[in-house]
Image (cartoon, rainbow, N blue to C red):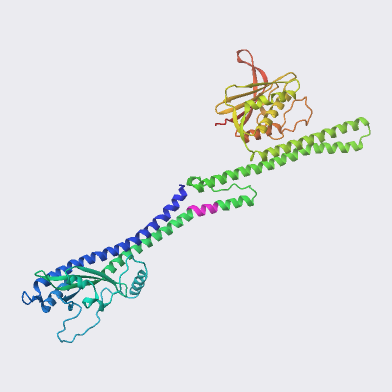
Amino acid sequence: MSPLALRILTINLPAFLVLVGAWFYLDQYRAGLVDARQEALTKEAHLVAGALGEAALAGSIENLRIDASLASYITRRAVLTTGARIRLYDAEGRIMIDSRQLPTSGRDVEARRIYDPDKLVWPLSWLQDQWDSAMGWLPRRDVYPRYGEDRLLGVRDWFGVPRALEGWTASGIWERNDGRLVIGVAVPVQALKRVLGAVMLTDDSREIDRAVRRQQIATLAVFAAAALITLLLSVFLSRSIIRPIQRLSQAADRVRTMGGRSADIPDLRRRRDEIGDLSASLRDMTTALNARVGAIEAFAADVAHELKNPLTSLRSAIETLERADKPEQREQLTQIILQDVGRLNRLISEISDASRIDAEMGRIEREPVDIGRMVLDLKEVLQSTRGSVHIEVDVAKGDPLTIMGAEHRLGQVLRNLVDNAVSFSPPDGRVLIRVFYEKSHVVLSVEDEGPGVPDEAKAKIFERFYSERPSSEAFGSHSGLGLNICRQIVEAHGGTIEVENIRHLGEHGLLIGMKGARFTVRLPLYKV
């Protein structure tokens, strides 16, 4: 996975996992507390039933029964210990004692509302009520029957009491209208292996709800902290992703509106992620665009300059032709006009070819090309059009000589280099073409026996419209685009082209003179 995808996942996944985990945890937490309270009530009910079976009996062994006064004292003491509501039923299922009914003994009882220490003040109480109401809407794992006070008053209203009178332990859970649960347990009261009644303990889920609420508030605090962290991380994400993208977008708009002249693209390569790669790509693209625009402008200026010279000469010859009286002058001027027209035609053709190559090399389809085979195939064609100059070919046998490229353009490079070598070679001279492998490159060299290249011209010989011709050639017979076209094609194939003089050494290694020029093309080898 990419660093950016990992960063986004790291920010969003933990909050989601906390939310889902807390949801199931609270539901299981509440259910666990209910089960624990039910087990505790069962143990407490057995303790109360045991105490009643030992200390609250009356009558003879044959008519043994539970004494209500003694049982009332025991149940009051048990209520203080268990905190549960206790009901005692006789052997017939009739209720004998309910710990919620005060034994008034005929006295008046005054009831007053007293201060509840657990009651919160407003608005905290209102918030708690709203919270409880909201939590009541959340789905729960279990559904309980509705609780009714009249259902637990007689033996017929709850199956647990009859089961307890049969000697079994029974338990149940109900739900009140306010959402609280009522947990009940019924156990038999036994003495001398006889069931004398049943005792039932019930308790609501007040304490359980408080414990769950505390956990919910704690979970809410965790959610709030997670939300705050998510917000801070979102701000960080915005600063680390959105703002850099906006900066890159604004820089790209500036490049577009300024015609590709601005290269002020933010350098974000230190990020080491996709945005850094995008920044590097945009910078490289802008640099290439600036170079392309600069090359187009320089090419247009060079073309205008080169076309201006023959046009000026042509205009001067035409103006002079109108005033010339002698036939030989008119003939000479006509020849000048024809030469200038030919020069213009040659310039326009080679300029068109150079422009087409510049546009073509960026989208041309490339294929494996065997340079050795290509040179051998072109040898006869090159020889047949070069007059008395001899073309020799030396292709290394057994060397890997295949590159990826466009064969017709590479053939154009060879033809231009041979044409250039022939133009500098003496009559009956020799041009040597060599092809060999060297350090992961295929090397193509063209050597002639001409005067060589002046040192001051080596740096400029591949420039557009530069021409360094022999004095025997007529002015304007070459446009100066041939070697420049060679460099364009070679560089488009990822190679290099250079020129050097072939030195003629005498005895003791002393330099006698120049023996010619050598043009060397190096192209990367194609590895299958």
Q: Is residue 418 visible?
A: yes
Q: Percent position (x, y) of residue 391? A: 70, 21
Would residue 330 appear left or right of 496 to someone viewing this image? Answer: right
Q: Residue at x 12, y 72 (%)?
A: 52
Which residue of the protein is positioned furthest toward the top in this rendering? 507
- Residue 524 relative to residue 352: left or right: left
Confirm whether the magenta stretch covers residue 512.
no
Q: Residue at x 70, y 26 (%)?
A: 418
- Quick one: 159 or 327, which is closer to the camera? 159
Count every numbered label the image shows and give the total. Answer: 0
> Dividing the picture into quarters, in which one does residue 325 lie?
top right
Extreme residue in the left direction: 60
Image vertical order of residue 31 relative to residue 259, above or below? below
Task: Please indicate, yes or no, whether residue 201 appears anywhere in the rendered image.
Answer: no
Location of residue 125 with respect to 421 vertically, above or below: below
Residue 244 covered by magenta stretch? yes
- 49 or 3, nearer to the observer: 49
128 over 2 or under it: above or below: below
Q: Where residue 203 sits in the image (x, y, percent)? A: 23, 72
Q: Which residue: 87% across, 37% down? A: 318
Predominant SS along the magenta part:
helix
Q: Is residue 274 left or right of residue 429?
A: left
Image quarter in which the C terminus is found: top right
Locate residue 331, reporting x and y percent. Answer: 90, 31
Residue 388 vs residue 268, the one in the foreground: 388
Residue 447: image x %, image y %? 66, 23
**What is the magenta range?**
240-247
